[in-house]
Image (cartoon, rainbow, N blue to C red):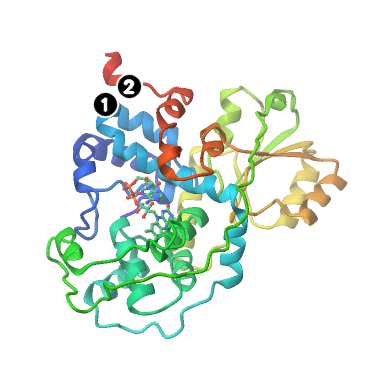
Amino acid sequence: MFTTSKEKLIQNLNEFSKNELVNYSFERNFDYGPPHNNVSKISPYLNKKFITEEEVVDIITKYNSIKTLNKFIEEIFWGTYWRGWLEAHPWIYDHYIKSRDDQKNLKKTGIKCFDYWKEELFETGYLHNHSRMWFASIWIFTLGYSWQSGAKLFEDNLLDYCPASNTLSWRWVAGLQTKNKPYIARADNIKFYTKNRFNPKDQINENIFSSFDFDETHNPLECKFSDYNDLKQKNDLCVILNNNDLSLNKVLEEIKLDYRCVLFKSPQKNKLKNKFQSQIYNDICSRNREIIIIESFQQMLEWLRINKIKNILFPYETVGKKLFNDPQFLNQLKSLKISYLFYLRKWDRNAFPFATKNFFKFKKHIPDLLKIANIRDKNLEN
Ligand SMILES: Cc1cc2nc3c(=O)[nH]c(=O)nc-3n(C[C@H](O)[C@H](O)[C@H](O)COP(=O)(O)OP(=O)(O)OC[C@H]3O[C@@H](n4cnc5c(N)ncnc54)[C@H](O)[C@@H]3O)c2cc1C
């Protein structure tokens, strides 16, 4: 279901934009099962910036007006919003990390849809959005497991795992994100939106009273980000690509800066995720022969020293995605007299300040955010 070639991904997204997007707002909630042609399946790429939001919007607006694309663009901004929201509420993620655990003895439950989705998740690393919601609701309210153990199961198995979207969506289903309004999976809704593939009538708990305690008494943090104006003055520069942003080098190409490029590979425990990662990394290297792959901090420090690197550009590490922003590693850079910057892309930099409250308030800024990103309605221009 998931190509690992950028060329093929762009081809698939063009096809999806031509054939499916016009019906997206009506069709998106139906889960017809794999290969899930009614949704884009771009999340595993978007989260790592194997393809960027700007590239996606550029492709989809070739075939559709922004008005037709409203719902799809809004969904893309859900991902941005969750990341920005968690950036302003980092303690929520810390609580999750401290309390997450593995659910032991995951046997068949006899609830056909649930057992099917669990296998689909293990086999493909993906689940349709509506099935993620049903799955999480059944996990918490029918099976009585903790939301944190469900979030951990997704964390370990989703190809598109994102600390913000995952943690906050599980909290939302549990009734923690919108206070005591849990998401209730209902048999007739599952029957309708799976086109009768499943009907767990009398098998799932639909009488839910969620009464979690609330820990969010703090105010959101104010997030301020640099505009990186001095980037052009950097010399002996190296950009370190990693899963936080696999195309950060394009930013330097746009401003015509010379740079060296390293792709940092950290192994994934899950076989499917590891294979997917290796293959997309190979694709990146096959398109740019100058990029070298490095697999450990020690090897990286050695390479930086030998190549006399003076400045490093790292992808910004949002909450839950910490990799190099570690005092010990950064001290080692200092001792080599290497300066560094954690670069947050414009798309996120412009949006995050609006993501401190609810999505409804955030959403009002989407038209302006598209304008700032230089995204115009091509259909209106022609
Ligand atoms: C319990 C639960 C856990 C989730 N965990 C993750 C996760 O770890 N990583 C992740 O990327 N998404 C997560 N989501 C959100 C959503 O399910 C996926 O982004 C979506 O299913 C990806 O499939 P797609 O690319 O085909 O989506 P499409 O419908 O084609 O949407 C296009 C893009 O919009 C964004 N998007 C769509 N819906 C959402 C949403 N509800 N929240 C945030 N972004 C959205 C994604 O970037 C997606 O690729 C979770 C949802 C739930 C209910």
> Where 197 sits versus 278, above or below?
below
Q: Quadrant of the C terminus?
A: top left
CA separation, marks 1 and 2? 6 Å
Along the viewing direction, whichever of 286 and 5 lies nearer the viewer: 5
Q: Quadrant of residue 11?
A: top left
Residue 106 placement (x, y as % from top left) = 39, 82
First in sequence: mark 1 vs mark 2 = 1
Q: Residue at x 27, y 48 (%)?
A: 39
Specify whether tag 1 is near ligand 1 (CB below 8 Å).
Answer: no
> Where 128 sits versus 231, above or below?
below
Residue 229 placement (x, y as % from top left) = 68, 24
Q: Quadrant of residue 180?
A: bottom left
Residue 264 placement (x, y as % from top left) = 62, 51
Q: Quadrant of the N terminus?
A: bottom left
Number of residues whose C-alpha sits closer than 10 Å to that of mark 1, classed few (under 14), some (14–19) or many (20 or more): some
Q: Residue at x 42, y 78 (%)?
A: 145
Q: Quadrant of residue 310?
A: top right
Residue 297 placement (x, y as % from top left) = 72, 56
* Amino acid type for the residue under numbered disc 1: Ser
Asked if the residue under mark 2 is in contact with the one under mark 1, i.e. CB atoms within 8 Å, the reply is yes
Specify whether tag 2 is near ligand 1 (CB below 8 Å).
Answer: no
Residue 288 seen from this side: no
> 221 left or right of 269?
right
- On residue 65, the disc is 1
Q: Residue at x 61, y 22 (%)?
A: 256
Number of residues whose C-alpha sits closer than 10 Å to that of mark 2, classed few (under 14), some (14–19) or many (20 or more): some
Along the viewing direction, whichever of 9 and 179 lies nearer the viewer: 179
Q: Which residue bears the numbered disc 2?
A: 377
* Amino acid type for the residue under numbered disc 2: Asp
- On residue 380, the disc is none
Judging from the image, what secondary structure is the residue with disc 1 in?
Answer: loop
Judging from the image, what secondary structure is the residue with disc 2 in?
Answer: loop
